[in-house]
Image (cartoon, coloured by chain):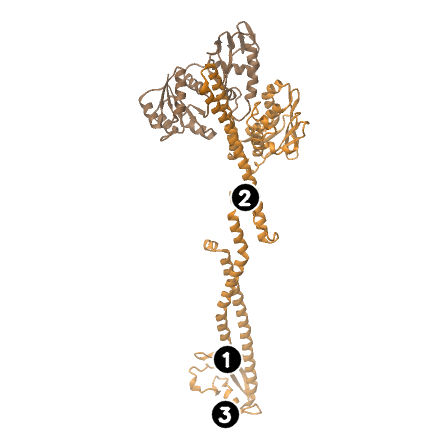
Chain colours: A orange, B brown
Amino acid sequence: MKGWWQRRSVRFRLALWYAAATALVLIAFAWFVYEVIEHRLAAEIDRQLRIDFDLIEPQLDIDSEGRVQWTLRGSHGDEGFARMSAWFEVWSEKRDLLLRHWPVPEANIKQAPSAPYGSTLKFATVELERGLFVRMMERPGRVQGRSVIIRVFRDETEMRRTLREIVEVSVLVFPLAGALAAIGGYLVATRSLAPLDAMARQARRITSESLSKRLPNLNPNDELGRLATVFNETLTRLEASFAELQRFTADASHELRSPLTALRAVGEVALRDGNDPAMLRETIGSMLEEAERLTDLVDALLTLARMDMTKADAARENVNIGALLEEIRDQFEVLASEKGQMLTVTSDHNIVISADRTLLRLALVNLVHNAIKHGPSNSKISLAVARRQGGIDISVSDSGQGIAAEYHEKIFEPFFRVDKARSRSGGGGVGLGLAIARRAVQRNGGQIIVESESNRGSVFRIELPWSSQPAERPAIT
Amino acid sequence: MRVLLIEDDGKTARALASGLRGEGFEAVTAKTGEEGFFLLSRESFDVVILDWMLPGRDGIEVLKALRADGSKTPVLLLTARDAVEDRVLGLNAGADDYLVKPFAFAELLARVRALLRRVDSGNALRQQIGDLTFNIQTRQVARGARQIALTPREFDLLTFLAQHHDQMVTRQMIAREVWREPNRATPLDNVIDVHLAHLRRKLDDGEAVKLIQTVRGVGFVLRAEAAA
């Protein structure tokens, strides 16, 4: 049932709702009206019965033979009519019928009402024959000092016809009203949902080629306008992700093609005019170097891609940050001292956080490697860790040429290099180190912030929580 | 020493086979899993180099069938899949070692030799390579009469080179075996180069025979004779 309901269109459901609600209200209303009218009419009949009783009782006599007689007295309009319409019975206290006055011939009534069995005021509805309902009032009375029970009757046919007409009109009108409500609901729903259909059509036309298109937003304050706003915001993010993906693909293929081009060129040239064994060895060596670079690049790309696929929580452990920093210093000290740089660690051994050690180390190693590579000779590179509210900050500071503010975000993009010319020569790496570092830190629930000015050195600060869920995967990268 | 090479890529198979022959192995190649299994059931080999991704029965199936037959021939599994789960799967299926593509031929050679060596003795405590004497226990190194003082890291590096003397070793092998660095994306190459330069200065400076030689595009080799 639920499935069926949910498979219907919104406007169909709305129409059904309207029809059902209308029918319910109408039925309740009609029932109320019916009850009120019935009550009123019944009360009126009962009032009439009391009046009849009051009129008839004084007009009863007992004649010389002891029989009860009815004599019309006073001026009560047409005597004949009164004689016709008056309808009563007089019973003795012993339940003997003393007088019965029927407006219709007695023969027409198949089933006479039974003898009274109480001696108090009593109202009752009696069916005399099929379809002929009468209202009866039974009340003890006195005829010339003798106790009797007087019953007066009134025909209920009129009242019942009125009530039946109400029911008939209701039965006739309700389906009509329900259908009207349904049709109206359907039309109104169709009209008010029409902009939604239009939005759906327009949205469908927005493909990967036309991501810059937006839905028209007529009224940003109504529900549809808010929907359009949300949809457009989503499109904006999608467009950005898409652009980022395209840039990444273009960059990656460029980076992959360069070594391949070198491989082919060097190989072809050597094949054409290489007869000198020494020169051939040189060529092959150079080709192997390019292959090595390709391998490094693929490894870095795989590392980057795999970080998004695996669950970081699986490798969570307690990491002593001070020990980790010292381990990294021991590993890279030799590289720094080659350039006359000082590599120092400021930490105590009591800082332990829950993190993926491999990823955290990967991030730090990349930052330290970068700092050594870009830092000038005889400068100082310092690794430091500090506690803060809710977590720790690990900073890698150098006194290199610094990074201009416009690049602070861009340097974390894959393959981005501040100095384009240096991209190939000078062992510039594959250009993924910072991208890998950022992703590795994000997987640990933290973030990397760079603080730097040109010629004033740079500080890469890793902000980590003591222990937390890994960050949501960002759009791309 | 007979080596069976099961590898579907013809170019790779030819290059590896000829390289192995050049190193004195008798190399037999098979192009499919079925062919490899057929050869294994008829002939005996000292080591099997098995590609994971093969047409028809893949490497893991061949490996499982081989182990189910009770064969103890060492198997080196080649694959482009380097996730930890893949390694576990491969080793559980009965592989003795695992090499991720792309690899340097030098590394393949080192691993094949290691598999063959696994049965016989461990490494000698003392080694003599040319006029280099080398004692793992006392950590003493000398060229001729000249004692050489090395840092622990330099000594480990030299140990690794000496264990693979006359064989080429790549930076990747050094990173993994000496630095115990499993992640290939960790930038260690420069660090290795610096340590190697230090080691070379201490060992070879002023000597007529340079023991540590660079092989361009591959890595390094420790040997007493000059390059051919």
Query: Residue B79, percent across and down?
Result: 43, 27
Q: Which residue is mark 3?
A: A66
* Residue at mark 1: chain: A
* Residue at mark 2: chain: A
Query: Residue B155, percent across and down?
Result: 54, 14
Whether pointer 2 and pointer 1 mark residues with C-beta atoms closer than 8 Å, the reply is no
What amino acid is found at the position of numbered circle 2 in the picture? Leu
Whether pointer 3 and pointer 1 mark residues with C-beta atoms closer than 8 Å, the reply is no
Residue A144 visible to the viewer:
no
Q: Residue at x 57, y 40 (%)?
A: A240
Location of residue A393 (image quadrant): top right
B121 over A461 or under it: above or below: above
Are discs 2 and 1 located on one and the same chain? yes
Query: Residue B71, percent across and down?
Result: 35, 23
What amino acid is found at the position of numbered circle 1 in the picture? Glu
Residue A258 visible to the viewer:
yes
Camera-side residue: B165 or A203?
A203
Q: Which residue is mark 1?
A: A158
Q: Which residue is mark 2?
A: A211
Whether pointer 3 and pointer 2 mark residues with C-beta atoms closer than 8 Å, the reply is no
Are discs 3 and 2 located on one and the same chain? yes
Q: Residue at x 49, y 55 (%)?
A: A9
Image quadrant where one finds the N terminus of chain B = top left
Distance from disc 2 to disc 1, alpha carbons, whole Å, reads 76 Å
